[in-house]
Image (cartoon, rainbow, N blue to C red):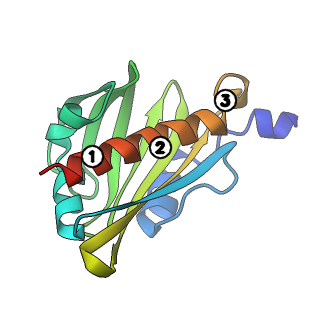
């Protein structure tokens, strides 16, 4: 239990270069979550909305983009989610397939993967997968809360993508 409680994961550069850039999250992190939703829109439309971070605050509740340059591998961005400032860096930007980044806040480290899968009938499956690690994290944050944030994100993304 103590080793899990104090787990801080790989160094951020290792997490970014050896995990996130290769489509992997940290399987040993205290919190790991995955959620999916199917949207009634083609993958091109989903990507256009999802990869346009400058407009996220229009459709995502409790989110603000603070600093953003290009959406490309290696590019940094800063944002606030639920009042918490996060420093992130894109790891994978594969149009119409995957958007992945690593991020830090309060010394905690995350990998966020967003994978798009085209389906029959012009629909798309969006899967969000995240690992979150850091000392004492399980004392105040849970997998249930992480999953709830993903479910909210997916619900809001679905609504933004399906909006006429």
Residue 150's mark?
Answer: 2
Whether tag 2 and tag 3 are in contact, CB under 8 A, the answer is no
For the point 41% across and 64% down, the residue is 21
Instruction: Give x and y (percent) for residue 25.
Output: 55, 57
Residue 97 shows in this picture? no
For the residues labelled 3 and 1, the Cα–Cα distance comes to 31 Å
Closer mark to the observer between disc 2 and disc 3: 2
Task: Give the SS element for disc 3.
Answer: helix
Q: Is residue 12 above or below residue 98?
A: above
Q: CA distance from mark 1 to mark 2?
A: 14 Å
Instruction: Give the farthest residue toward the right.
Output: 1
Q: What number is the disc on residue 121? A: none
Q: Quadrant of residue 37?
A: bottom left
Question: At 55% across and 54% down in the image, what residue appears?
Answer: 34
Quarter occupied by residue 43: bottom left
> Against 86, is 97 above or below?
below
Labelled pair 3, 1 in contact (Cβ < 8 Å): no
Label for residue 159?
1
Q: Position of residue 157 (x, y in %)?
A: 30, 47
Q: Residues within 10 Å of mark 2 (few under 14, many from 20)?
A: many
Q: Label 2 vs label 3: CA separation?
A: 18 Å
Instruction: Indicate the position of residue 156 as horizontal and vertical percent values.
Output: 32, 41
Mark sitting earlier along the chain (1/2): 2
Q: Which residue is mark 3?
A: 137
Residue pushed farthest top?
83
Q: Nearer the viewer, mark 3 or mark 1?
A: 1
Point 18% across, 68% down: residue: 44
In the rendered image, the quadrant that contains the N terminus is top right
Label 1 vs label 2, nearer the camera:
1
Tell me the crowding category of disc 1: few under 14, some 14 to 19, or many 20 or more residues within 10 angstroms, Cα based. Answer: some
* Residue 116 position (above or below residue 60): below
> Residue 101: x, y in percent?
38, 51
């Amino acid at each position: 239990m103590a080793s899990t409680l104090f787990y801080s994961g790989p160094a951020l550069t290792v997490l970014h270069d050896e995990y996130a850039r290769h489509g992997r999250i940290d399987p040993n992190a205290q919190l790991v979550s995955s959620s999916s939703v199917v949207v009634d829109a083609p993958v091109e439309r989903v990507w256009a909305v999802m990869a346009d971070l400058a407009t996220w605050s229009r459709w995502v509740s409790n989110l603000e983009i603070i600093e953003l340059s290009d959406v490309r591998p290696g590019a940094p961005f800063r944002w606030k989610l639920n009042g918490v400032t996060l420093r992130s860096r894109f790891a994978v930007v594969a149009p119409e397939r995957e958007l992945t980044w690593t991020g830090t806040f309060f010394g905690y480290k995350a990998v966020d993967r967003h994978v798009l899968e085209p389906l029959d009938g012009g629909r798309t499956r969006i899967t969000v997968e995240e690992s979150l690690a850091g000392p004492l994290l399980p004392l105040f944050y849970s997998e249930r809360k992480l999953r709830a944030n993903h479910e909210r994100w997916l619900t809001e993304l679905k609504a933004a993508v399906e909006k006429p």
